[in-house]
């Protein structure tokens, strides 16, 4: 089972990296946003810059996975290759885990420039231990967003998936407090944020990279979202039969 | 040689490899497969013949686990094909238009092989299907015929016991087609079960022993190749006549009239005896599509039940 997971991960990665522009694209936006918003406005203060970088990374994690999987999977399903792969003797697990691994690798590519920019052009700073913790946490918070993308991708046709991803990403970013400094969002956002996957994720990130207090409810809500999207994605996969006719 | 000799128990002569029982598949308000009963026994080569839209691919999708029946039951190698365990001895051709364009031929073969407990080696797959020098080519750069060969090769890569081949040689040149048929026959000689779908009689004729004709989601005929060949041997008679001859089932607009019949001689003889004022008589073998039409409509099949 595990070797099959690696097989799926390897082939998805190969497919992804054979079209370099897709990879460059997903690395471009987080880096560009970093240069446009964080460097000029928050770059001079170590604490603000560190928090802002953590927010930007969470934003990139959400954004990349939502679009990568929401739309990518939905488009894959419309291809005749997908129903064929379903006739191979493998269930949902290796395909899902393969996608997860590919997604994590993609995260490394998308986030490396953000980290590099933060280190070179801002005063953001943290201990090596905190950095290692943040890297691990990054992998962990990617999981609910990958599953969220898969839920969308497996339950909707690609045009609908695009719309849903576009509708979701801004409220998720704003409502989770990713666009404001810790504690700086409007009151209702502060109340709501820990219960959103974005807000839960970014609070854990802040607590790892700075002095932001660890909030158990943020961690719990993130675990809850992960389970929910995991179930939703599996359900959507099971009921999916690819194209309707063909 | 292509058949896996390992798992002998499922290879018992006469064992049912694929079964459909009163299977119906609806899409929205349409019915793609309508109450189909079908049994494919180990070692058989069955041709699924029918025009486009007859429900062939849907039926194959149901039997190979990529679709779920609306009602009825399907079984593959003794279990539910939606359970991956029962697909370990199954081989299917992907649609060649769907091969992942950026992957190389060898990579696609390895991907498929890695799903099976005892697959053919990569070079065996490449050699047997004449893909040897293409291993490093991306599938997006292959010609139509090369893609088709790869698609068929993938069905055999896992050393299956039963394969579903979807129009395996459409668009191939004569030589490539012969090679492929040879590979399928070799697989069959080793005890393998083959279900072949096509809307070309020629392809079915070259390989199948038993033919199942589908039309509008139903089984119209399930018989030996010989019997079905007779059934779909239909001629099309065309004449020009100022008035439609009464007592015949001619159809058409203007003064050009057509009739589909299994016994053209008899119809022509009758036209002459009855002094029908026709000219420009033309008799030609009906296309398979037209033959299916007569099967579906059940009219004029014998040429004598003209109303």
Image (tube, coloured by chain):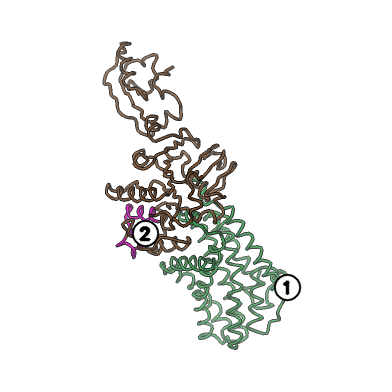
Chain colours: A green, B brown
Q: Which residue is mark 1?
A: A217
Q: CA distance from mark 2 to mark 1?
A: 55 Å
Q: Are marks 2 and 1 on the same chain?
A: no
Q: Residue at x 32, y 59 (%)?
A: B127
Viewer-proximal residue among A131 and A54: A131
User: Disc 1 is attached to a residue of which chain?
Assistant: A
The answer to whether marks 2 and 1 mark residues whose Cβ atoms lie closer than 8 Å is: no
Instruction: Looking at the picture, tell me which residue is in the foreground, B240 or B265.
Output: B265
Residue at label 2?
B125
Q: Is residue B272 left or right of residue B153?
A: left
Element type at mark 1: helix
Tell me residue B15's x, y (percent). Answer: 50, 45
Q: Is residue B237 left or right of residue B95?
A: left
Left or right side of B47 for B144:
left
**A198 or B30: nearer the eye?**
B30
Where in the figure is residue B206, as x and y percent of width and height? 34, 41
Which residue range is magenta in the image? B132-153
Q: Which mark is residue B158?
A: none
């Amino acid at each position: 089972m595990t070797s099959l997971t690696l097989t799926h991960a390897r082939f998805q990665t190969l497919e992804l990296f054979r079209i370099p522009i897709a990879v460059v694209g997903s690395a471009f936006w987080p880096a560009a946003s970093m240069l446009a918003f964080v460097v000029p406005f928050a770059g001079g203060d170590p604490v603000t810059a560190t928090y802002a970088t953590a927010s930007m990374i969470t934003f990139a994690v959400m954004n990349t996975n939502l679009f990568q999987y929401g739309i990518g999977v939905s488009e894959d399903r419309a291809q005749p290759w997908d129903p064929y792969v379903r006739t191979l003797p493998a269930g949902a697990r290796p395909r899902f885990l393969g996608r997860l691994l590919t997604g994590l690798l993609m995260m490394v590519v998308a986030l490396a420039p953000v980290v590099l920019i933060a280190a070179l052009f801002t005063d953001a700073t943290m201990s090596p231990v905190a950095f290692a913790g943040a890297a691990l946490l990054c992998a962990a918070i990617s999981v609910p967003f990958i599953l969220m993308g898969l839920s969308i991708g497996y339950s909707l046709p690609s045009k609908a998936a695009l719309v849903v991803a576009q509708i979701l990403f801004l409220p998720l970013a704003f409502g989770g407090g990713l666009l404001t400094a810790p504690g700086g969002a409007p009151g209702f956002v502060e109340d709501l944020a820990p219960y959103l996957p974005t807000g839960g994720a970014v609070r854990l990130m802040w607590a790892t990279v700075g002095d932001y207090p660890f909030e158990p409810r943020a961690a719990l809500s993130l675990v809850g979202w992960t389970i929910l999207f995991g179930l939703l994605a599996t359900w959507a996969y099971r009921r999916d039969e690819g194209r309707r006719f063909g | 040689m292509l058949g896996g000799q390992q798992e002998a128990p499922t290879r018992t002569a006469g064992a049912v490899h694929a079964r459909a029982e009163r299977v119906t598949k609806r899409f929205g308000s349409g019915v793609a497969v309508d109450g189909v009963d079908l049994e494919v026994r180990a070692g058989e080569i069955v041709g699924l013949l029918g025009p486009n839209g007859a429900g062939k691919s849907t039926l194959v999708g149901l039997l190979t686990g990529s679709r779920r029946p609306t009602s009825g039951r399907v079984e593959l190698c003794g279990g539910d094909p939606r359970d991956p365990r029962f697909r370990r001895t199954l081989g299917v051709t992907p649609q060649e238009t769907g091969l992942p364009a950026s992957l190389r031929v060898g990579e696609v073969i390895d991907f498929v092989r890695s799903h099976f407990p005892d697959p053919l080696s990569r070079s065996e797959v490449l050699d047997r299907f004449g893909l040897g020098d293409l291993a490093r080519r991306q599938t997006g750069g292959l010609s139509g015929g090369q893609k088709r060969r790869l698609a068929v090769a993938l069905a055999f890569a896992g050393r299956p016991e039963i394969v579903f081949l979807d129009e395996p040689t459409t668009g191939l040149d004569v030589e490539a087609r012969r090679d492929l048929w040879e590979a399928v026959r070799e697989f069959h000689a080793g005890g393998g079960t083959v279900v072949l779908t096509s809307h070309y009689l020629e392809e079915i004729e070259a390989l199948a022993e038993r033919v199942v004709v589908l039309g509008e989601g139903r089984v119209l005929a399930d018989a030996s190749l010989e019997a079905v060949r007779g059934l779909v041997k239909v001629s099309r008679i065309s004449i020009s006549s100022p008035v439609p001859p009464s007592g015949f089932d001619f159809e058409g607009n203007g003064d050009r009239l057509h009739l589909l019949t299994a016994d053209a001689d008899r119809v022509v003889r009758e036209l002459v005896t009855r002094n029908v004022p026709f000219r420009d008589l033309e008799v030609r073998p009906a296309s398979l599509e037209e033959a299916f039409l007569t099967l579906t409509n059940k009219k004029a099949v014998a040429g004598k039940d003209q109303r």
